[in-house]
Image (cartoon, helix red, strand yellow):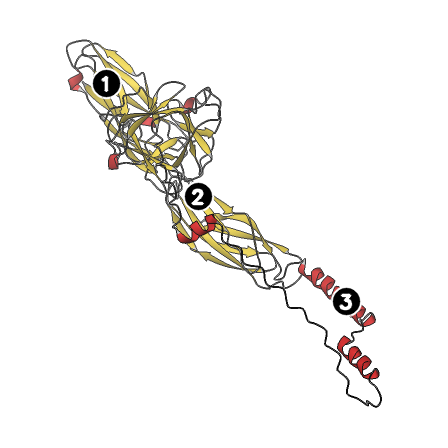
């Protein structure tokens, strides 16, 4: 066969479309039918029309390649190679792969969010500013803070940033009031953090710092009440002070007054009143047998802990991302752009099955560290989570659905890597153990595509395996 791409290099805006013509001539001596398959990183965004072409010997046909990269960080700015695999039906060994080049234009989109938007404190507040690069080029900038009345000072670390496409930077900000409120009610200070980039209007984010007084507001009236009660008690004490007399002195005076004025004979002194002996202290009760056993013998050993069972295999479960608070799902029927993709959506326990999965163990101990390899089958359409083509795939590869194979020759096998907080990395066995990921950096919304990405505990690669309430 003879092939030609016209033009061999094209340019497209993210979110737009462009078309390239592929001309094909049958240089053989038999009628042949040719099938066309896009390959490479751009293949999910390439549409071939028609998908096959039947040519007589010596004749030429044309197909159109339509490129539609999305306006997301996955559409990397700059030249991107692509290829079309042409497979002759009569002579499949004569497969040809013409290559071309598609230049994706750069675009910039930056978002910033305060976490939390309102902070409270007496001497400082520590909000975080999350800056997301939703464009397809690297973003560089700096940060500054301001407020009306200059009530606050700002410490921003780091003061400048450089963010790769699809990633985010978290900036620690320390707010310090210039004047301490010792007494009284709290005061709200509104402030603004500005994300500055060269040649672009600064992106501003507003927040509130609630400055509390050094002593709580309720403490002042409490002190007043206690002081008033103390003064009232002292005045009552002096007004109604009880008279305290000595009974011993009264008895002594009475005894002196009864003595004879001139004793003529010695008299026996009056006998002293008998003083009763103090009652014997009660005997200390004997320790109970149980207490004696506790003191003399060792404590009973606690029961042995039960071994936590494995979560695999699992049927009719949901995969929930704790960062985005959404679940792995099939795209809505109206979302034709996501056909064949696996997406995230608001978690719904409806038993229809579009968010329910079976984790089917295919190799019990073949994974890293003797872990189980399993395939992820959707309960609704009985297709399995898959990657394009066969073998290892690079990061940012789309997560697709395909007929279940469950062998090491394909890339449908996964293994679980449990994290310290009880969540799991779901890692692809064929693709250098990369993780199941949500496109973007912790900012994906409803319908966002799932991709393959480097495992991390600071993004959205962690998953929970939960069982719906109706199961």
| Numbered label attached to residue 233 | 3
**Which circle, 2 or 1, is nearer the viewer?**
2
Whether label 3 touches label 2, CB < 8 Å: no
Give SS at disc 1: strand
Q: Quadrant of the N terminus?
A: top left
- Does 414 appear above or below 236? above
**Which circle, 1 or 3, is nearer the viewer?**
3
The residue lying at 82 percent from left, 90 percent from top is: 264
Q: Would residue 310 appear left or right of 262 to someone viewing this image? A: left
| Numbered label attached to residue 132 | 2
Q: Which residue is mark 1?
A: 24
**Which circle, 3 or 2, is nearer the viewer?**
3
Q: CA distance from mark 1 to mark 3?
A: 108 Å
The residue lying at 84 percent from left, 83 percent from top is: 257
Q: Nearer the viewer, residue 91 or 26?
A: 91
| Mark sitting earlier along the chain (3/2) | 2
Q: Is residue 165 visible?
A: yes
| Numbered label attached to residue 306 | none
Q: CA distance from mark 3 to mark 2?
A: 65 Å
């Amino acid at each position: 066969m003879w092939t030609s791409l016209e033009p061999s290099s094209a340019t497209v805006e993210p979110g737009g479309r462009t078309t390239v013509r592929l001309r094909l001539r049958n240089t053989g001596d038999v009628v042949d039918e040719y099938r066309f398959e896009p390959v490479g990183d751009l293949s999910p965004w390439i549409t071939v029309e028609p998908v096959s072409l039947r040519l007589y010997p010596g004749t030429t046909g044309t197909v159109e390649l339509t490129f539609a990269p999305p306006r997301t960080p996955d559409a990397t700015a700059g030249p991107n190679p692509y290829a079309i695999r042409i497979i002759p039906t009569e002579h499949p060994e004569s497969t040809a792969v013409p290559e071309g080049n598609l230049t994706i234009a750069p675009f910039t989109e930056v978002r910033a969010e305060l976490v939390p938007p309102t902070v409270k404190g007496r001497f400082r507040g520590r909000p975080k500013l999350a800056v997301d690069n939703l464009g397809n080029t690297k973003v560089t900038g700096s940060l500054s803070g301001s407020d009306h009345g200059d009530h606050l000072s700002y410490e921003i670390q780091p003061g400048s940033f450089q963010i790769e496409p699809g990633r985010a930077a978290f900036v620690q900000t320390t707010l310090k009031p210039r004047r301490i409120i010792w007494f009284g009610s709290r005061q709200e200070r509104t402030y603004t953090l500005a994300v500055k980039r060269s040649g672009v209007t600064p992106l501003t984010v507003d927040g509130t710092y609630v400055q509390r007084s050094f002593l709580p507001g309720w403490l002042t009236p409490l002190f007043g009440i206690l002081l008033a009660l103390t003064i009232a008690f002292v005045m009552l004490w002096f007004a109604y002070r009880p008279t305290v007399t000595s009974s011993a002195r009264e008895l002594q005076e009475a005894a002196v007054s009864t003595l004879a004025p001139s004793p003529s004979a010695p008299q026996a002194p009056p006998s002293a009143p008998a003083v009763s002996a103090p009652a014997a202290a009660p005997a200390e009760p004997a320790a109970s047998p149980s207490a004696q056993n506790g003191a003399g013998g060792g404590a009973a050993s606690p029961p042995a802990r039960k071994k936590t069972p494995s979560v695999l295999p699992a049927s009719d479960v949901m995969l929930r991302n704790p960062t985005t608070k959404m679940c792995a799902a099939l795209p809505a029927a109206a979302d034709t752009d996501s056909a064949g993709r696996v997406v995230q959506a608001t978690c719904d326990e409806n038993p229809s099955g579009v968010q329910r999965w079976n984790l089917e163990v295919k190799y019990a101990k073949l994974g890293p560290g003797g872990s189980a390899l399993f395939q992820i089958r959707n309960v609704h359409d009985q297709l399995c989570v898959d990657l394009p083509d066969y073998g290892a795939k690079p990061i940012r590869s789309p997560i697709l659905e395909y007929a279940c194979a469950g062998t090491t020759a394909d890339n449908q096998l996964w293994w679980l890597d449990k994290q310290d907080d009880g969540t799991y990395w779901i890692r692809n066995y064929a693709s250098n153990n990369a993780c199941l990921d949500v496109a973007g950096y912790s900012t994906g919304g409803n319908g966002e595509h799932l991709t393959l990405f480097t495992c991390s505990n600071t993004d959205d690669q962690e998953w929970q395996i939960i069982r719906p309430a109706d199961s």
